[in-house]
Image (spheres, rainbow, N blue to C red):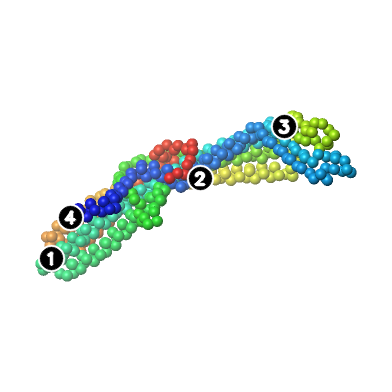
Amino acid sequence: MFFRFICAVLLFGPVPLAAAESRYTLEDCLRIARAQNPDVLIAAKQIDVARGNLITARAGNLPTLRTDGYYQERQQSLATSGGVNNNRPQDYTLTAGLTQNLYAGGAVQGRISIAKLGEMIAAKNYQTAIDNVTLNVKLAFYRVLFADAAVKVRREAVKFMESQVRDQEDRLKAGTVGTLNVTRAKVTLANERPLLYQAEAERATAYLLLAQVMGVNLNPGQRQPDFTILGSLVHVQRRYNLAECLARALANRPEIEARRLDIQSLENQVTVEKASTRPQVNAFGAYQLFSEANPALSPSYFSGFTVGVNFSWTLFDGLATPGRVRSVTARISAARQALRAIELTVETEVRSALESLHQAEETIRSQQENSALALESLSLATGNFNAGLATQLDLLQGQVDLTRARLLAVGGRFGYLNAVARMERAMGSNDQKVVVPETVALAR
């Protein structure tokens, strides 16, 4: 065997070792998701869009330099009239002009203010994306932990049922029990195995959902992500005050601040719309070089500077400006209602998360005692069965009760951690400070 291995190495090269499977904690999953989740990357790109809009708005305060020119050449017949050459066959003009806005009725400053607010809104939306991804990763992570714990509980139950089948078969051979006991043990085992398979399938699905939230791509032939997680469903009791939670949520939630910035942006838009009926003043300067069509004039070209001030004022535009102002005013009223709606939604999220916390606490408290009682009951049933004081049905029922109690206890801890994650999200809290990216790249 060793000689064959050496020959294979010489012929085909070293045998590649299997890649080590990555093991991620919750912090690792959050870090990867914040760097790779599509929603976060899209929100980051929107910040770049807003910064581009700000550069565009600021251009209104800067001078504009423009050049124009043309060249044309006529047929000789067009340049000649009555046998006399009245025009030159070639004409050309070159103009370079500089224009500076002096007064635009407040439109330029209004657009700059809107663009700045747009950048702030994009930053708040980016923070919202981070908060949403953080919550989704936590929920998916806890779901994997719950599914893994459920698999362990189901495996213990199957292992116990298998031991009961073997025990009853041995007792049947010894003649101490009848066929009914063996059949009942096999039926109970057959009923428990599909529940184990279901738990394993739910764990596989939980891993897929976690990979999706993290932005981890799977190969076409890959059924499961190539990582596992490290953690446990630990219950650390926390106390929340409803009034404090509501106050924190209304002060910290980025969605609420974004809606407030929307209202300010629309108020600046009113100024921009009204500017179209105010005076517009521009200063300009130009240098022009052109040909003179009349050959009797000399020299054959002319050049010179032009400077001046351009003034315009639209006194009546058919009520277009009042119509646009009315439209923006209506949008401001709608934005205020949207702000109130999201405040109510946030308050509901806080109250709902708090109720879920209380329910999970009660479940954990009751199932801790119940699990201990179920384990004690199974121990008593086992002892009584061995002493001939209890039936096999009592023993099997004791194991079923213990499995159910353990699953409920795990579910209580899972529900509590979910409720804590939702409460932190409802209050706008983050495990890490959100840093708005200076530059955003979609590199993987």
The amino acid type, in three-letter code, at marker 1 is Arg
Residue designated by label 2: 342
The amino acid type, in three-letter code, at marker 3 is Ala
The amino acid type, in three-letter code, at marker 2 is Ile
- In depth, the one of 96 and 85 nearer the eye is 85
Residue designated by label 4: 379
Q: Earlier in the sequence, mark 4 or mark 1?
A: 1
**Res. 309 in view:** no
Residue 123 in the figure: left or right of residue 386: right
Residue designated by label 1: 171
- In depth, the one of 96 and 227 nearer the eye is 96
Label 2: how many Cα within 10 Å (few below 14, some 14–19, many 20+) = some
Element type at mark 1 = helix
Q: Earlier in the sequence, mark 4 or mark 3?
A: 3
Q: Earlier in the sequence, mark 1 or mark 3?
A: 1
- In depth, the one of 360 and 159 nearer the eye is 159
> Which residue corresponds to the image point at 49% horizontal and 45% vertical from the top-left?
42
Q: Earlier in the sequence, mark 3 or mark 2?
A: 3
> Which residue corresponds to the image point at 32% horizontal and 53% vertical from the top-left?
147
User: What percent of the width, then of the height, locates residue 200?
Assistant: 31, 57
Residue designated by label 3: 286
